[in-house]
Image (tube, rainbow, N blue to C red):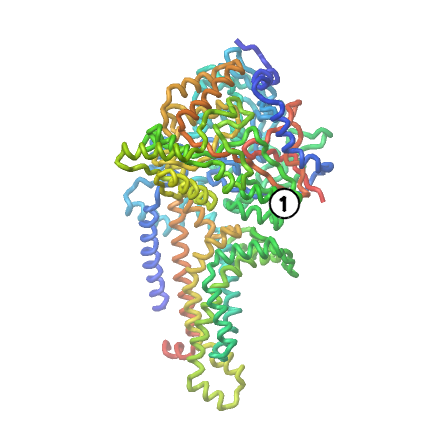
Amino acid sequence: MGLIARRLAQLVVVVILSTLFAFALLRLFPGDAADAVIPYGTAAQKAKFRADTGLDQPFFQQYATWLGNLAQGDFGKDYQSNTPVADKLQTALPVSLQLMLYAQIMALVVAIPLGVLTAYRAGTKSDRAINAGAFALLALPSFVLALALAYWVGVKWHPDIPLLGQVPVSGYEPGWLEAVFGAPTGDLGKHFATMLLPSVALAAGLVAVYMRLLRSDMIATLQENYITMARSKGLSDGHILWRHALRPSSLTLLTVAGLNFGTLVGGAVAVEVIFQIPGIGTLIYQAINARQLVELQSYIAIIAIGYVLINFVIDALYVVLDPRIRRARA
Amino acid sequence: MSSAIVSTRLRARLGAAVLAVASATAVLVGVAPSASAASSPKPGGSVTYGLEAETGGGWCPKNAQLAISGIEVGAAIYDTLVVPNTKGQIVPYLAKSIEHSADYKTWTVTLRDGIKFHDGEALDAAAVVQNIEAYRSSPLIGAALQDVDTVTATSPSVVTITTKVPWVAFDWFLYLDGRMLIEAPAQLTSPDCASDLIGTGPFKLDHWTVNQELVAVKNPDYWQKDSKGQKLPYLDKITFKPVAEAGQRVNSLQGKTLDIIHTSDGQQVDAIEQQASNYNLLKEQPGRREVRYYLMNVKDAPLNDANARKAVALAIDRNQINQLRNDGIFTVANGPFDSDVPGYLKNTGYPKYNLAQAKKLASAYKAAHGGQFSVVLEHTNDPANTAEAELIKEQLAKAGIDSTLKQDDQTAFIAAAVGGNFSILLWRNHPGDDPDVNYQWWQDGSILNFGKFVDPQMQTLLDQGRSETDPAKRKQIYQQVNKQFATQLYNVWAYYAQWVVAAQKNVQGLMGPPLPDGGGQPLFLYGRHPLLGIYVTK
C-alpha cells in the first residue's frame, strides 16, 4: 500500500510538473488558436473567440481551469470541430497503444536472443558483426526507415503475407484493443498487415538499444559465482543462459523498455503521420498545427500518466524477475 | 423590373464574347482519357479517395474554410445551386433557373421540385435563404457577399436576392469554387453543425472520424439519373482519407491503398503523368488554373517602394523556378488570369527577367536607404515550398537583394497574411472563376487584401467590372486590372498550377455525366470534380 501511495503521489507530481511546463511552452507558439480557427476573422471576432474559450484569461487561471476539468475527466474540446477530446482519445489511444506494444514485442523478440548470443560469444566475429549492425540501426531515425519501408516494401515490393494479405503502404485497420475502448474493431489480418511496417520502423532503433543493454548486463552476470557453480554442476550452456543468466540480466532492459514509452510516443508522431495511422502521434501533430492548445495539453497529460503507470508496473515486475529484490522488500 | 431572362440566355450573354471555343475544347480534351476508356457504368462498389488535408473545421457555413479537400467532400454530401460548365458558364443545378433583373440588382433563384435533404426535409426557399444568410455571417465568404442587400423567400420555391450594386457575375458567387454548399436547416441549427453533415448530395454521411476517415454512403433518393435512366450515384460508398504528404499520396495510389488521389504539386503531377498508362487521369487544362505568386507587402519598407518591387520582380527568373520546382510542366504566368478568364492578356507588360536592371534598381534603393535592401521569404513548411524559397533567395542574392527564409505552418502562414506581418509570401490563389470573384482579394481596405495595396485606379476598375453589363467592355476592364498589376507589381506572378486527379484503371467516370437540363459538361475547376458518376469496373 505504501508503494501504491508513493506512486500515486509521484503520478500527481509528474502530471502537474509536465503539464505546467508544457502549458508554458505551448504559449511560446507563434500565432494563437484564434488565428487557426478563424484566420480570416476580424480582431473583434478573434477577441470574442478568445473570451469564449477562456484563452484571454491569465496563464495560471487557464492552467487551473484546465487541470480542474481534467481531474473531472473533461479533456476539453477541439475548438474547430467542437469534438470532445475524449472522443478522439477513444479512437486514437488504442491505435497508438497497439502500435507501441507491437514495436516493443518485435524489438524484444529480436533483441533478447541477439543480446544473449552476443554476450555468450563476446569478442568474437559474430559479436562484432551483430554489434555493428545494431549501431547502424541505432543511427537510423525511425522516420527515415519509415519512408524507406513505405516506398520499397509498400510500393515496390508490395508483399502478400499468408493470413495477413497484402502489406499496404499506408492506412489503418482497427484491431483488438479498440473493443476495450468501445470503438469499432476490424479485420485482424488486415490490422496486423497495416501495423507491420510502422511497427518495424519503430522497433528497429529499439532493437539496438535493448540488445546492447542485455549484452553488457549478461556479460557481467556470466562472471557471477552462481554461474560458475552451475557450470561446475554440468548444466548445459543453453540452460545456464536462458534459465539462470537471463532473468537477473534483464532488469536494466526492463527499466529502459519502460522509459522508452516516452521515446516511442515521440517516434510514433512521425511514423504515424507517414503511415497515416490515426493514433495519438497523429493527433499531436494535428493539434500542434491547428494550435489546439487545450487538446495538446490533454494529450501531454495522458502521456505523462501513462509514463508513470508503466514505470509503476515495471517496478512491480522487478520483484517477479529477481528473487533477491522480493526477499529484500519482504 | 424583371426581364425574366432564363439561365440559358444569361449564359449566352456572359459567355459568348469572352470565352474562346478552342480553350473550352481543350478542357473537354482534358477529361477525355477517362471518358474514352469508359465501359458501361454499373451500380455498386466503393472507392477510397486520398485527400491532401483534413477539413478539421468542418462544414458549417459560418465557420467553414474549405480548401480542395473540404470542397471535394462537399461534392459528395451536398449540391450547390449552380455549377460552372466547360464553356465557362454558370448553369442551374439545385436551382431550376436563375434570372436577373435588367439592372442586375435583383436575382431570382427558382428551385427544382421534389428534392429532399438526407433527413427527409424538402429543399425549399426558406432553407436556401437560411444557407445564404449563414454564409453572409462567415468571415471569409461574408466578405465575398458584402454587396448582397437582401435575401428573401418570395414563394416556397423562389428566392429573391437583391444587391447593393448592379452585380453582373453574381451567379458565380452562388458557387465560389464549390464552397456554397446548400445544407439542411437541421444541420445549420445543430450544435454539431460542423460535423453533422446533411445535404441533398449523392452521398450521405455515414461517419466521420477526424484525421482518420470520412465515410459517405449512397443516397438512394438522389434526384439525378444518368442518360439511360439509371439512378445516380453508382457507387455504394466513398471513403475519404486525409493523406497530407503529396508523395505519400502517390505512393498509396501506386500501392493500391487508395483508389483516387488529387494533387497539384508540380513534381508529383509530373511523376503521375510519367505513369499515365497505369491510371485514369483527370488533368486540368490551361484556361482556368489558379496562379502561384509571390505576394508582396506594399504597406511596409522596402516593398512600399515601387522600384524595390520592380527590382525583386526583375531578379526572379520564373522560368528557372518552373523548371526546377515543377519539372517545367506548368506555365509561367504574367498575371492573375489564365487564358480563358476574361481579362487574360498574353502580354500584360509584366517585366521579363533582367538581372542587370534588377542589380541597378537594387543598388539605387540601397544607396537611398543606408545600404539596406532585405526581404523575408515566408512559406509553408513542406519541402517543395522550402526548395522554391531557397531558389528565390539565390536569385535575389545575385541582384544584391538580401533575403531570409521564414517557414510557417499553415496557421501561422495565414495569420501572417491576415495580420500584414510579412514581407513576401509564397502564395497561391485566383482559380479561373469570373474575374469579379477576386474583388475582395484586391479591394481597398479588405481584410483579404493581404498585400495591403491601396490603389484608387484598381478599385475603380473592380467596381466597374462588377457592374459592367457589356461583356466586351467588361473584358477590357479586367485587362486593365491585369495591366495595373503588371505596372504596379504588387505581386510577382510565377506560374499557373495544374490540378490532377489520378485513379486506378478500374475507377471510371471521374467527371460524371453531363449536367442536367442540357447544361453541358461540368468544369474541372480548382481540382473539384463531381463524384456522382464514378463507377468501378473489374
Task: Label 1: state its secondary structure.
Answer: loop
Q: Which residue is mark 1?
A: B275
Q: Position of residue B296 (x, y in %)?
A: 38, 32
Name above or below for residue A3 compared with residue A289: below
Q: Chain of mark 1?
A: B
Name above or below for residue B381 compared with residue A179: above
Image-based side of B90 in relation to A315, left or right: right
Screen quadrant of the C terminus of chain B = top right
Image-based side of A83 in relation to B233, left or right: left
Image-based side of B108 in relation to B480, left or right: right
Name above or below for residue B487 compared with residue A199: above
Q: Residue at the spot x=35%, y=28% of the render? A: B306
Q: Is residue B128 visible?
A: no
Q: Nearer the viewer, residue B434 or B144?
A: B434
Name above or below for residue B294 compared with residue B170: below
Q: Residue at the spot x=52%, y=73% of the render? A: A113
Q: Residue at the spot x=48%, y=87% of the render? A: A230
The kind of residue tagged 1 is: Gln
Q: Position of residue A81 (x, y in %)?
A: 46, 40
Most distant residue in the left direction: B370
Q: Is residue A316 visible?
A: yes
Image-based side of A29 in relation to B54, left or right: left
Q: Position of residue A297 (x, y in %)?
A: 38, 50
Q: Position of residue B344 (x, y in %)?
A: 52, 24
